[in-house]
Amino acid sequence: METNGSASVKDREAAADDQSHPLDHLLRQDRLPHIWCSGCGLGTALNCFLNALIKSGLDPDKVAVVSGIGCSGRVAGYVAMDSFHTTHGRAIPFATGLKLANPRLKVVVFSGDGDLIAIGGNHFIHAARRNMDMTVVCVNNFTYGMTGGQVGPTTPTDARTSTSPTGNRDHPFNLAYLAAASGASYVARWTTLHVRRLERSLTEALLKPGFSFVEVISPCPTLYGRLNKQKTGLDQMQYYKEQSIIRHGADPRQADIALNGQIVVGKFVDLDKPSYLELQKG
Amino acid sequence: MTAKGPLCGEFFINGDEACAEAAISAGCRFFAGYPITPATEIAERMAERMPHVGGTYIQMEDELASMNAVLGAAWGGAKAMTATSGPGFSLMMENLGLGIITETPCVVVDVQRGGPSTGLPTLVGQGDMMQARWGSHGPYEIIALCPTSPQEMFDLTIEAFNLSEKYRTPALLMADEAVGHMTERVVIPPAESLQLYPRRKPTVPPDQYRPFEGGANGVPAMACAGEGYHLHVTGLTHDERGYPVTTDPAVQERLVHRLIDKIRNNRADIVRVESDGLQDADVVVVAYGITARVATWPIEMARAEGIKVGWLKLITAWPFPEDLIRQLAGRIQAFVVPEINYGQIALEVERCAGGRARTILVPHAGGDLHEPHVVLEAIREAVQVSNIKSQMSIKT
């Protein structure tokens, strides 16, 4: 119920009692409030995912969320579905076993850049290669947030982190390119600014057979942002607004992200090719 | 191979093949693995046979993936197994711990070979026994079985599945290359005649179910994904709801203590040995795996010399038969422990003997079986009266 400042105290009090949120039925109420920082993009990413799940029409009782370790990995603990918070980097093989043992499940992997791409990198490319039947959502905040903001495989060159104090010398992975090159049948990238487009891509990804990958560029104001001149979540959202460019069908090879540079977003890959399970029937 | 279901009858197959067939007979319908000598034949047999029984074989990109896929499959409702050797076993350690804290039933086979490191890929070793007990970090108990023949590769794989389901824990089959690659007669009973322990499902609705609350024997009922129970399963320390609680030592104590008691308090059901001649023994040879078979010949020779020597074969290496060793130590002179390593189970024997009987380790670095005369000499030495009972001596 909406209320405005001029409503009577009684009306405002009555409104304040209605604390429910449209996504309450998909969240573990007894685990809230969540642990994420103010300005973190994970709340938005989770919100878009749950809305996409509703729009997809999938039965939440048949959805399993598998995560790894990190701030993004904590998503598994907040969804009121079968959820598995596994070890660092190993969400994808766990999800593989889960799906193959019970193909009626819709298996979603929800994790972060360090977890999925560094320690989990090998599993990521092989699952994409197999076009394994799962949706993988990678929340990419360019850092290892949970452990204090270390450099990771997606940290832009020259960025400062707690383990690259004089600037990152490495070149980062371009996750959209990596996923596409490995064989994913669906690849999209959005930032947490693009809530409606992200939700739409997530819906498509959830309904797509095979390995569907959605990269979500997300702020980490507490660590990455603070060390790289984007102190608040809003600062990073401002950066996304100024530097994002939507290019559906773009060649992911042209979508590298430089420090505070352009972010190419959109749906890059949407192929019709047999998924792992479809191939087994042959 | 024309069989389309579990096998039944008499076969002349090797230990690895028997292990795969046992898994099928036990109802295993998911195998994830990675090639590694001398366990590869298990994967190859499963690759061929899983489709025959409507199961899944997947060759993962490494052993870390294999262990995790097995855990995932178990939570998807399947009986799941993987098989490896030393180097792969090491890679599986972290996620074995995930299986332990999440109480995931599954079977992990280690066909031990010469180590450490790459070691002797094609030759026997028994050097992973302590790793089987303590290889993953943190405090925990584990169940590990040691087959001494292809027949036991079959029988104990069935047992491993049963124990893993009954106690909601990964169960290890600590085989060795000698047994894995040995071809011998294996009798496979009809699958329907096997006593299989079914996964215990919850009998209450989702809002009343506590997925990590121990039942009467400390073991929780297990709902799986897709059954409407909306489980949360985490490797973090968790409460009875499965929710992580990482700031309260009392929750850690409750969880870890229950996990440990789950195995320790059920030792009478889990621990198995086979023995001969213990009742009037002066010396007892304690052995497991292929070495338990090797030991029978020197024991025969020693008995012919008039030495009263007993044979104690460990079917379960873990939990270790502490009570039996303690009891024997009170009335014998010495234990002789031949093993293909430089002292692992011997340490347990010595610990439990508590200084009341000597422990004589007969080591072997790996690559071959013990020569009978070396074990015989250790038995002879064991009956010599000695005042130094508390120190383990090593027969070189």
Image: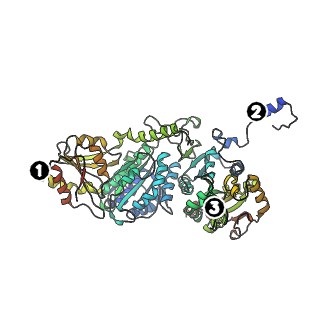
Considering every residue shown, the one lying at the far right of the view is A6
In the picture, the quarter occupied by the N terminus of chain A is top right
**Disc 3 marks which residue?**
A165
In x, y percent, where is residue B162?
40, 46
Q: Disc 1 vs disc 2: Cβ atoms closer than 8 Å?
A: no
- Judge depth for marks 3 and 2 and give the one in front: 3
**Of the two numbered discs 1 and 3 in the rendering, the one whose residue sits closer to the viewer:** 3
Q: Mark 1 points at which residue?
A: B306
| Furthest residue toward top | A10
How far is the residue under mark 1 from the one under mark 2?
89 Å
The alpha-carbon separation of the residues under discs 1 and 3 comes to: 75 Å
- The amino acid sitting under disc 2 is Asp
Q: Residue A212 carries which label?
A: none
> Disc 3 sits on a residue from what chain?
A
In this rendering, would B73 be left or right of B375?
right
Identify the subunit bearing mark 2: A
Query: Element under label 2?
Result: helix
Q: In the drawing, does residue B46 fall left or right of residue A100?
A: left
Q: What residue did someone put label 2 on?
A: A17
Query: Label 3 to label 2, Cα distance in Å?
Result: 48 Å
Q: Is residue A63 visible?
A: no
Question: What type is the residue that disc 3 sits on?
Answer: Pro
